[in-house]
């Protein structure tokens, strides 16, 4: 185990270690729980940051890998490591963690000890999902994650918390079980082919060619098992109705983590398992997937538009935004996948920000109804500014993060399915409509007496938002560092799903250039020959997975 | 040229400073920062403009760094200064500066003074980014950014109901257009593999006429959709008249002189690509012409002085598009340039009137202000001459050039343009007569009326000079000139390629110009005569043609139609989605029904789990009896 691997595990398991320590603290010590859990999250984040810089952008391989035998008879290993995709989501998780704690200090007034312990356990479970390289371990973390969330909503939630918590639990469990069926189907197929048991993700991905030779129906059934499992988590239409309930009932931190990280488990699952393991079946089902993504985009936006509860509005906006995220992914080209990854990160920044913004007024007035507010810009100017930044980030204004995600997704989708991109843009228009309409009704217009007396944000509240605002601007203004991390793993994924994609693209480009030359005899040929290098795309020549190497070095 | 980046960045800094500390420090400081930053950036802009003028091929490419680099896409961050962007840059910083100065007087009582100037500075930053950006991505950043500023400034009076509504309407209507631009960009990227302006134009030049023009037409049409949003053309013009809810200087700067012309700028920037798609150009010409006429007719009977000017702006923007569509890119841009001066002047003049009358905007409550506000009167008079196209004021040359090209494209377009121009003359003279001539119709306001302070009148005078003289930059050949602005813009508009502008034949040019000018004057005089003594003529008109008047006053009921056919159904459908699908079908039938059935089944089975021994013994007895019966049968 290298020292980096050690620190990766340290950052992942530090929260749960802190939770174990807090178990021994008497429950009256409020400050110990609040500061202790914040400290654990912050240290975990601090440990995670260097990984951003240490990551070798040229390689698509799993980095800082480590594997120890665990249950050898079943082929289960304790196998960890990260590629660029997991790294980004892992970092997002350590980043959101402290925010979740900080926004709970005032909001949580009872059973603090259990609350913070569950938050810490949840954090480790989520981080674990992103570092694991073993299917068994993955499933373990995936299931463990559900328990703290269930309690967070069920104990500290709103009036209908039990309904929401049980709904969340059953929905997700149903998805997990289906996913398990899918995993086992491939597991036993693998045994039949190779004669051994191996739960490693790499070996599952290596099964793709074998799977492609199985009966069509078998492939499609397995793909559907994975699809439903992940689609519930995302959530995609029509598996989404647990989400608004969970969000509305959850305490603020619950919503923040639910929106920020938990939903990304679903999208991550798609990227990690469905696409690389079952590429053929996925492509066959693609028209349906795309239809569901598009419905989700527009449906979520339409339903969000007529909500009267701010939290419910934001919850439905998640359905719409994640529909876009899925659409980008289903384009199955580098643009779409990168945009999808961006959208995961962006949604993990904007939507927690919006939930926090709702919480600010909820903590003061104990209502989330849009109609109860109005004119808050007058009494809470700082809040107005921050809320506006988060709103603009969510609707994809340039120089803020959302723009990069939406733009790149649309680029990718347009290349693959132009009409789908055009349809998706209506969702983006509606997105601006419901967000700004809510913003207007809350922040502008005549102000009532009770709203005029509301105090502006406290320092703690500003501090909770600050990292989100900074991140939103950073990604919006200078997304290149993140993009570089995605390059190699995304290229590898594209090659897994669409073998020969890059070769075909390079060929098409050459043909187009030749056609242009042929038709326009006197055009300057130098220009076209120079084209690939001019556009900085050595990607087009090198086959993946080594493909990324040339890429990182080139620039 | 290392200082060039400061031109947009200075106003950005002004924005940040004023937003962060403006509330705490005094208005003097806010003014110094806001006006100072724009002044400096204007001075630098002049320097840069002169440097560009001296440069080879009138073009400076200032590359700063690689902004985004992934796969086949490289987006550099850099500026292009050429005759087109250079002229716009001067207009933005120059007129921007005048309007900043004017605002110092106009807004001095406002509580949100710092906020106002912060947004105004931010606008200048984004507008410069839009104009100078060397890639479509950077231009799009500016494009969306000015939209944001427009939204913020329209909603400046946020404690009212109407201003935030107007802001929202503006933002959303523009969003529709913006996505057109986004799709157009994607299509251009798909066609050319690059998003830098120079890259696209270079490749467009190499394109043989057979290659994928259908696709290119799609791309340019989409870009034009974007232009109709930002530049308020049919059918996306709806937001601009409402945008008058913002402070008047904002209407002058953003909603008359600069931002609303960015659609025209975008098309000029990509002129060589639009040249390749004649279908699009025809669409542009007709949409422009129809908008010019449509908006002008709405302007005829509006009562709010700013509304008249707003519809006038929509109409004038239509003229510009008409020019572009008639492949007169230089002519269209020429009108952008002259219009910037006289329309800014008209708005600022209207602002001065409103200021004098303590926020009275209703023309029917004005009258007789000629002697009370002489500077405002005389400067607005010059602007009126310019907009009605009276020679030799600036509007004459630019509008005449457009009408001439429209005639070459299709005589019907010329007729439409001339009718629109006649309406323009009429409503402008109606506005002037109702404001400055006749008896005051609101004596209280009239008695307290006064000329505006120097910070407001000086900008009026400067703009008046521009409105009077800047037409001479483009005197057409028919009048002995050589359309200098066309020559000046040529390298930018053709990008060094062969297909260029129309040649200028004298032909019917003089006859056409004479006809339209004489008609314009007649309608102007008509308006003035009918309104200089009061409202009698209009009251007579209402009595005679109530329906016509009502339809025009209510803007053809387009807003109502949109509400009825688009917004209402959308909300209805949202409700259906939510209540029918989510609540009843998915949650009700799909989730809660099985749950309820499970519960019912559980409850039923639980009936047998009573916990009472006698029940168990009884059922056991029954079972034993049944078994015995079966065994012994």
Image (tube, coloured by chain):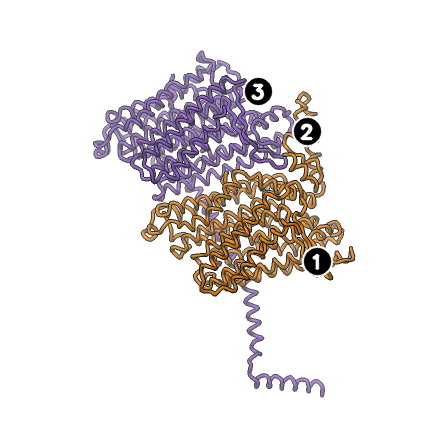
Chain colours: A orange, B purple
Find residue B496 and name its label.
3
Q: Chain of mark 1?
A: A
Circle 3: element type:
loop
Q: Position of residue A497 (x, y in %)?
A: 69, 46
- Eyeballing the image, is A361 above or below B183? below
Q: Residues within 10 Å of mark 1 (few under 14, many from 20)?
A: few
Q: Position of residue A262 (x, y in %)?
A: 56, 54
Residue in front for this viewpoint, B537 or B320: B320
Q: Residues within 10 Å of mark 2 (few under 14, many from 20)?
A: some
Q: Which mark is first along the chain, 2 or 1?
A: 1
Q: Quadrant of residue B294?
A: top left
Please name the residue that numbered disc 2 is placed on.
A513
Count of marks placed on residues: 3
User: Distance between the Cα atoms at labels 2 and 3?
Assistant: 22 Å
- Eyeballing the image, is A165 above or below B570? below
User: In the displayed structure, does residue B379 sit left or right of residue A56?
Assistant: left
């Amino acid at each position: 185990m290298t020292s980096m691997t050690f620190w990766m595990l340290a950052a992942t398991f530090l929260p749960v270690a802190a939770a174990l320590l807090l178990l021994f603290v008497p429950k009256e010590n409020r400050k110990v729980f609040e500061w202790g859990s914040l400290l654990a999250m912050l240290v975990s984040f601090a440990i995670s940051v260097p990984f951003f810089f240490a990551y070798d952008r040229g390689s698509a391989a799993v980095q800082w890998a480590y594997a120890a035998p665990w249950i050898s008879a079943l082929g289960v290993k304790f196998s960890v490591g990260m590629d660029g995709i997991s790294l980004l989501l892992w970092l997002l998780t350590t980043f959101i963690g402290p925010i979740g704690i900080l926004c709970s200090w005032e909001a949580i007034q009872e059973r603090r000890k259990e609350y913070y312990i569950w938050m810490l356990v949840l954090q480790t479970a989520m981080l674990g999902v992103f570092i694991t390289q073993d299917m068994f371990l993955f499933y373990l973390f995936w299931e463990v994650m559900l328990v703290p969330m269930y309690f967070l909503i069920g104990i500290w939630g709103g009036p209908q918390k039990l309904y929401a918590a049980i709904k969340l639990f059953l929905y997700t469990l149903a998805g997990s079980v289906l996913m398990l069926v899918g995993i086992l189907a491939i597991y036993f197929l693998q045994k039949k082919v190779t004669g051994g048991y191996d739960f490693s993700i790499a070996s599952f991905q290596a099964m793709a060619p074998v799977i492609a030779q199985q009966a069509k129906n078998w492939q499609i059934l397995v793909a559907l098992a994975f699809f439903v499992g992940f689609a519930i988590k995302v959530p995609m239409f029509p598996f989404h109705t647990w989400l608004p309930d969970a969000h509305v009932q959850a305490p603020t931190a619950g919503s923040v983590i639910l929106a920020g990280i938990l939903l990304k488990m679903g999208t991550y699952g798609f990227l990690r398992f469905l696409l690389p393991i079952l590429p053929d079946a996925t492509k066959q089902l693609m028209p349906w997937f795309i239809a569901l993504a598009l419905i989700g985009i527009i449906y979520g936006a339409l339903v969000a538009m007529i909500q009267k509860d701010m939290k419910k509005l934001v919850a439905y906006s998640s359905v719409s935004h994640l529909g876009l995220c899925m659409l980008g992914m289903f384009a199955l080209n580098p643009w779409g996948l990168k945009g999808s990854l961006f959208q995961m990160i962006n949604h993990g920044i904007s939507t927690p920000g919006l939930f926090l913004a709702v919480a600010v007024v909820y903590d003061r007035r104990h209502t989330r109804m849009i109609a109860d507010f109005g004119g808050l810009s007058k009494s809470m100017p700082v809040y107005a500014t921050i809320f506006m930044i988060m709103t603009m980030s969510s609707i994809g204004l340039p120089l803020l993060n959302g723009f990069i995600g939406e733009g790149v997704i649309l680029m990718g989708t347009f290349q693959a399915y132009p009409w789908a991109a055009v349809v998706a843009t209506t969702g983006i228009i509606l997105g601006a409509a419901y967000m700004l309409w809510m913003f207007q009704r809350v922040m502008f217009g005549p102000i009532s007496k009770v709203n005029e007396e509301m105090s502006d944000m406290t320092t703690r509240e500003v501090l909770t938002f600050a990292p989100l605002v900074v991140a939103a601007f950073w990604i919006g203004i200078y997304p290149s560092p993140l993009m570089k991390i995605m390059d190699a793993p995304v290229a590898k994924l594209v090659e897994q799903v669409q073998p020969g994609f890059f070769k075909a693209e390079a060929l098409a480009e050459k043909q187009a250039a030749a056609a242009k030359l042929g038709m326009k005899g006197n055009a300057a040929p130098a220009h076209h020959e120079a084209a690939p290098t001019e556009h900085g795309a050595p990607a087009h020549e090198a086959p993946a997975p080594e493909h990324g190497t040339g890429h990182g070095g080139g620039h | 040229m290392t200082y060039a980046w400061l031109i947009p960045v200075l106003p950005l800094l002004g924005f940040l400073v004023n937003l962060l500390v403006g509330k705490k420090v005094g208005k003097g400081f806010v003014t110094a920062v806001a006006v100072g930053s724009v002044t400096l950036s204007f001075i630098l802009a002049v320097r840069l403009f002169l440097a560009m003028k001296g440069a080879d091929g009138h073009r400076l490419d200032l590359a700063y760094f690689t902004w985004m680099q992934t796969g086949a896409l490289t987006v550099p961050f850099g500026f292009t200064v050429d005759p087109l962007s250079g002229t716009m840059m001067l207009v933005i910083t120059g007129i921007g500066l005048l309007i900043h100065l004017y605002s110092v007087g106009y807004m001095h009582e406002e509580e949100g003074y710092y906020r106002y100037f912060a947004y105004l500075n931010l606008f200048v930053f984004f507008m410069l980014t839009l104009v100078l950006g060397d890639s479509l991505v950077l231009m799009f950043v500016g494009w969306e950014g000015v939209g944001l500023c427009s939204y913020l400034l329209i909603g400046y009076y946020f404690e009212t109901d109407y201003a935030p509504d107007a802001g929202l309407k503006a933002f959303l209507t523009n969003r529709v257009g913006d996505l057109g631009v986004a799709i157009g960009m994607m299509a251009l990227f798909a066609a050319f593999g690059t998003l830098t302006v120079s890259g696209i134009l270079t490749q467009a030049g190499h394109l043989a006429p057979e290659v994928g023009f259908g696709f290119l037409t799609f791309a340019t049409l989409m870009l034009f959709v974007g232009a109709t949003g930002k530049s308020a053309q049919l059918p996306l013009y709806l937001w601009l008249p409402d945008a008058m809810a913002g402070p008047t200087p904002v209407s002058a700067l953003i909603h008359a002189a600069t931002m609303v012309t960015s659609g025209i700028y975008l098309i000029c920037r990509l002129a060589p690509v639009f040249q390749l798609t004649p279908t699009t150009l025809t669409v542009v010409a007709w949409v422009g012409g129809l908008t010019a006429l449509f908006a002008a007719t709405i302007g005829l009977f509006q009562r709010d002085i700013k509304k008249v000017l707003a519809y006038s702006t929509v109409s004038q923007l239509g003229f510009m598009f008409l020019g572009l569509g008639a492949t007169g890119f230089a002519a269209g841009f020429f009108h952008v340039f002259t219009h910037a001066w006289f329309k800014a002047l008209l708005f600022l003049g209207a602002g001065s009137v409103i200021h004098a009358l303590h926020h009275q905007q209703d023309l029917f409550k004005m009258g007789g202000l000629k002697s009370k506000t002489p500077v405002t009167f005389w400067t607005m008079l010059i602007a009126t001459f310019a907009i009605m196209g009276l020679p030799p004021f600036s509007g004459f040359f630019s509008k005449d050039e457009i009408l001439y090209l429209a005639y070459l494209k299709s005589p019907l377009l010329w007729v439409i343009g001339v009718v629109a121009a006649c309406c323009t003359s009429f409503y402008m003279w109606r506005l002037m007569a109702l404001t400055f001539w006749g008896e005051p119709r609101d004596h209280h306001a009239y008695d307290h009326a006064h000329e505006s302070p120097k910070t407001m009148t000086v900008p009026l005078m400067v703009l008046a000079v521009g409105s009077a003289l800047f037409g001479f930059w483009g005197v057409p050949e028919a009048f002995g000139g050589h359309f200098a602005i066309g020559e000046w813009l040529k390298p930018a508009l053709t990008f060094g390629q062969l297909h260029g502008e129309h040649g200028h034949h004298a032909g019917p040019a003089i006859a056409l110009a004479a006809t339209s000018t004489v008609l314009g004057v007649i309608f102007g005089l008509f308006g003035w005569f009918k309104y200089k003594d009061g409202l009698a003529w209009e009251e007579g008109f209402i009595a005679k043609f109530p329906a016509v008047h009502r339809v025009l006053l209510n803007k053809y009921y387009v807003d109502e139609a949109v509400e009825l056919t688009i917004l209402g159904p959308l909300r209805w459908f949202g409700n259906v989605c939510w209540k029918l699908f989510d609540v009843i079908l998915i949650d009700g039938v799909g989730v809660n029904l099985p749950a309820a059935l499970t519960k019912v089944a559980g409850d039923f089975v639980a009936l047998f789990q009573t916990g009472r021994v006698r029940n168990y013994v009884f059922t056991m007895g029954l079972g034993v009896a049944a078994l015995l019966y079966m065994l012994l049968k």
